[in-house]
Amino acid sequence: MKNSIRVSILVPIYNVEKFIGKCLDSIFSQTYTNVNFVFADDCSTDNSLMVLQSKLAEYSISSERYTIIRHSENKGIAQTRIDLLAEADGDYVQFIDSDDWIENNMIEAMVEATDNGNIDIVGCDFFWEYANGRTKANYDNFAGTCFDNMIKTINFQITPVLWKLLVKKSLYSNFKIDSTINVGEDYIISIKLFFYANSFKHVEQHLYHYVQLNKSRLSSQIKRGIKDHIKAVMEVESFFKNQNINNEAIIEQLMLRKFNIRSNFLNNRFLDYDEYNNCFPETKGIWRIINYTKREKFKYWLADHKLFFLIKLMQK
């Protein structure tokens, strides 16, 4: 296969010294060689950069093939993605999270699927890698068109992540990334990329290994994450309105996504009835069309009738 298509591999780094070595081994061992690397360290407090420098020397990666961005303060993943894209000079860009790893033929397989640069976005399947050593294969039900993939992404019928997508870099010039949304930024970006793209190809191979760490989080941290997801879906809704898009499938998927976010406030881990009432109240009753169990539907019926004390009894 010709190596005429240049790929920029973009790697955000933050406190990953235990994992980044395996990631770097995988990207420096790619069978496709017309690649360069852009790394952005978001003010790590561990030895992540030392591991990076050691691996660059181990694989004899010349200075012309890589760029390292160093943040003097922690800016978050969204701004880090912005900075990585600004330094990328490839025809296509591929994000790789620094605690994950990829198959050594991933870039070659993805580039081959671009049909000599005529395909805007190429997607692949991936593995979930768990802390207990278990691996689970994920099969995303990609559609044939970018528009259908965009609709499927809205309510997570397709996993909304950037690292499984090889994307023509020019697509990113169609919009700006919101640097204030650091949970759900992949969601917004994926939807916008599919909106502006004209062509898509699915490589039916598991080429990416996503490390799912079993990190316990405080309820306050979970709530902050939910708040970012609320901002993300509102950003997507605003985007469609600004584009004068009034599509029934989009509206339905947005409503389902909103309700999925809202339902977090009735989670067993923490109950917040005020938040539930105030979060996307326009989705009231939409649980009726979702394939929930009778018990779940009864819970949401109680919530609609503000019988929260009964929900609390159910969850004891």
Image (cartoon, rainbow, N blue to C red):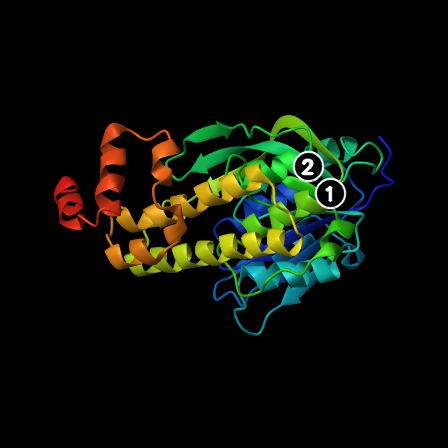
Q: Are marks 2 and 1 in contact (CB under 8 Å)?
A: yes
Q: Please, is residue 140 above or below residue 166 in the view?
A: above
On the picture, is 182 further left or further right than 305? right
Q: Earlier in the sequence, mark 2 or mark 1?
A: 2
Residue type at the position of mark 2 = Cys
Q: Position of residue 226 (x, y in %)?
A: 40, 55
Q: Which mark is residue 271?
A: none
Residue type at the position of mark 1 = Ala
Q: Residues within 10 Å of mark 2 (few under 14, many from 20)?
A: many
Q: Secondary structure at mark 1?
A: loop
Give the farthest residue toward the bottom.
72
- The residue carrying mark 2 is 146
Q: Position of residue 260 (x, y in %)?
A: 39, 43
* Residue 16 in view in this figure: no
Q: Residue at x 22, y 46 (%)?
A: 305
- The residue carrying mark 1 is 197
Q: Residue at x 24, y 55 (%)?
A: 273
Q: Residue at x 21, y 43 (%)?
A: 302
Q: Secondary structure at mark 2?
A: helix
Looking at the figure, which quarter contains the C terminus? top left
Q: Residue at x 64, y 47 (%)?
A: 245
Q: Position of residue 159 (x, y in %)?
A: 53, 38
For this rendering, which residue is in front, 48 or 250?
250
Q: Quadrant of residue 140?
A: top right
Q: Please, is residue 205 above or below residue 222 in the view?
A: above
Q: Position of residue 186 (x, y in %)?
A: 56, 50
* Residue 89 in view in this figure: yes
